Image (cartoon, helix red, strand yellow):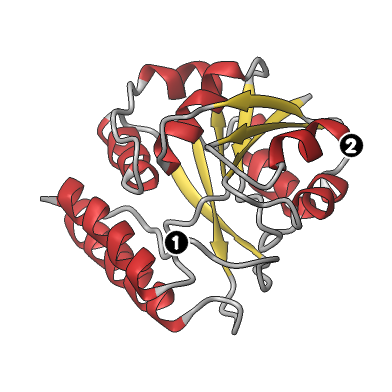
Amino acid sequence: MIDVILPVLDEAGAIPVVLGSLPTGFRPIVVDNGSTDGSADIARAHGADVVDEPRRGFGAACWAGLGAAESEVVCFMDCDGSFAGRDLSRVSDPVLAGEADLVLGARRASSAWPWHARVANRALAWELRRRTGIALHDLGPMRAARREPLLGLDLRDRRFGWPLEMVLRADAEGWRIREVPVDYSPRIGRSKVTGTVAGTARAVRDMARLLR
C-alpha cells in the first residue's frame, strides 16, 4: 500500500472524482487546509483518511500529510482533478524499484495549464538546471519518494516553496532525482493558486526566495 497525500482547500467538487481515480494499492490521505465547503466530510464519506491542518499553506498541508503517512513510499498529488490517478504508478514505480530516490511527474503541455503558470514553471526549472545540473523541466506537485528519508530532509517551507525546497535538499543529499511524463487536465472548480496571475506570482516569489 502506498499513501497518497492530497492537500485540499475547498475542493468539494473534485474530491469524489479524484478519490475514485486512485488505483488499487494507493491509500488517500486528504489534508484539509481550512476548507469551508465541506471538503473534509466529503473526503471521509468517500473513504479517505482526513488530516486537519488549520495553518494555511501548501507546504504546511504536505508536511502534515507526510507526518500522518505510514507507508514506506509516499506520493503527493493535487486534489483538483488536474492529475490522473492512473499516473501514480508511473511516478512511484522507479522509487519502489530502487531506480530513483525522488520522482516528479512532468506535466505534458496542455491548454489546461495557464500560460502564466507554465512560463513561470519553465523559468524556475531552467534556473534550477543552470544552478544544480538537475535534469528537471517541471516542478509539479505529483511526486514520489520514500517516507523516512523525506522526513529526514527536514523541509522548513510551509508555503509554495515546498516543492522546490524538496528538490534542492534532496539534491544536496545526493538523491537520484528523475522525472516521468504525466497527463494534465482542466481542474475542477476555481483555481486559488496557479490558475490566477496573483497566485502564480505568490508561488514564484516563494520559490525565488529559496533559490536566492
- The crowd level at tag 1 (other Cα within 10 Å; few <14, some 14-19, many 20+) is some
141 vs 173, nearest the viewer: 141
Instruction: Please name the residue that numbered disc 2 is placed on.
Output: 24
Three-letter code, disc 2: Thr
In percent of the image, x 66 and y 30: which residue is there? 96
Q: Position of residue 126 (x, y in %)?
A: 28, 67
Q: Quadrant of residue 26?
A: top right
Circle nearer the N terminus (2, 1): 2
Q: Quadrant of residue 183?
A: bottom right
- The crowd level at tag 2 (other Cα within 10 Å; few <14, some 14-19, many 20+) is few
Q: Is residue 166 above or below residue 133?
A: above
Q: Position of residue 20 (x, y in %)?
A: 87, 48
151 vs 160, nearest the viewer: 160
Instruction: Please name the residue that numbered disc 1 is placed on.
Output: 193
Q: Is residue 92 above or below residue 118?
A: above
Three-letter code, disc 1: Val
